[in-house]
Image: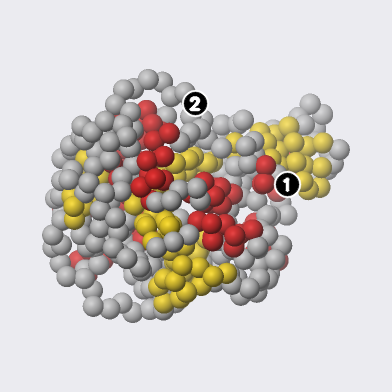
Amino acid sequence: MSTTNGAGPGTPKATRAATPKSAPDAATQAAPEPAPGTRAAPAAPAAQIAPATQAPPATQAAQWFPPEWPERIRALANGELEPPVARRAATVLLLRDAAAGPVVYMLRRRASMAFAGGAYAYPGGSVDARDEERDTGWAGPSRAQWAVRLGTDETTAQAIVCAAVRETFEEAGVLLAGPDAETVVADTTGDDWEADRAALVARELSFADFLARRSLVLRSDLLGGWARWITPEFEPRRYDTWFFAAALPEGQRTRNASTEADRTVWIRPQEAAAGYDQGELLMMPPTISTLRQLVPYATAADALAASAGRDLTPVLARATLRDGEIELSWPGHEEFTRHFASAGPATPGASTASVVSGTYPAPETSAAPTIAATPVADGACLAPAATSVQPAPPAQSAPAPSHPAATDGASA
């Protein structure tokens, strides 16, 4: 089933929570290393953001500034490296209002993770091939409208939007869906919801079948496009990631449902950015960049309203080889520029390798004192969420995007 929202651009619509079909769980049991597809219970309440407990060992530091980077960049410049295809992915900046201003939901990836272990990030993940299924229940701006907004075809646009909603449910227990275009699910903490969430994580259940089973429609109007970043061509794991902003639906509560995270927290963007600047919190460039972009907004509604005008041109970077040195830079993101020695001279005539943005070195000090943060319990919310925080929907018309989207592996 599919419905479209007739609201025009910049016209937020109030939402109301649907009557829950099951009671919430009475309690959850903590498990240090949950098995894939099983619940990762919230940790005890905490009033601070925990940085790494000690300076990262060489193996961890290598994840952030791998010693093979110069060699791989040279190989790319010399035409000796075939860039892996970037997998499409989506991530969500989940917001809600608190007394001191909007807070954003973040999770810390387990240190054991091969990709960005120990880093703070947002809920998100790769597109599942089944996210393209046309029978996905849908409400809000159409697939065609989202295709214009994201600079893709309709099938890809649907897959990206579905991935954003699905991954937010899988990793945070928050579902941007409801029985119709006017309501959202009021509660997703029951055992039956957890069973469905685990089945989604295990890929035993498609998102379209999940929505159909519960007579729900995906609320695409609750998402606002925010940014797009693509991992460097010289990285072995590459993602073409669309970032979205969304507000925590009324009545729903977050929980650490991700098997990839060991901690979750609600934090003010400026506090998280300060932790990064002080070397306390590890973040990848896309994370800290989008985090800083949230700082000016006084409310979650303000941020979501601004999403309609956000430029979704992919963030691209350049690796320039000159005189035995590599300069890795991101136009428009000067704080991420890095210089390091090349493993050797590049082949004449191949002095510049175009790459796309992804990781960069971690701060040298990661064991600084903890920073004060909005008091929260891991995965818990402090106050009821706003009832009518929505982004402006994508434009109704379908002109060509002003900034054509790059294809997987595109160079600057």
- Residue 327 appears left or right of 324: left
85 and 271: which is toward the camera: 271
| Residue at position x 17%, y 70% in the image | 23
| Residue at position x 28%, y 63% in the image | 384
Work out which residue is located at the far top of the displayed protein and give it.
Answer: 399
Q: Residues within 10 Å of mark 1 (few under 14, many from 20)?
A: some
| Residue 61 on image: x %, y % | 67, 62
Image quarter (top left, top right, bottom left or bottom right) of the C terminus: top right
| Residue 191 on image: x %, y % | 22, 70
Whether residue 369 appears in this view of the structure is yes
Q: How crowded is mark 2: few (under 14 residues within 10 Å), some or many (20 or more)?
A: few
- Residue 59 appears left or right of 50: right
| Residue at position x 65%, y 63% in the image | 279
Image quarter (top left, top right, bottom left or bottom right) of the N terminus: top left
Residue type at mark 1: give it. Answer: Arg
**What numbered label is drawn on residue 174?**
none
Counting the numbered discs, the total is 2
| Residue 9 on image: x %, y % | 31, 31
Q: Distance between the residues labelled 2 and 1?
A: 27 Å
Whether residue 80 appears in this view of the structure is no
Q: Pointer 2: what residue? A: 403
| Residue at position x 35%, y 68% in the image | 382
Give above or below for 42 relative to 334.
below
The image quarter in which residue 138 lies: top left
**What numbered label is drawn on residue 338?**
1
Look at the numbered disc 2 and give the secondary structure of its residue: loop
- The chosen color scheme is secondary structure
Give above or below for 174 relative to 143.
below
Residue type at mark 2: give it. Answer: His
The image quarter in which residue 186 lies: bottom left
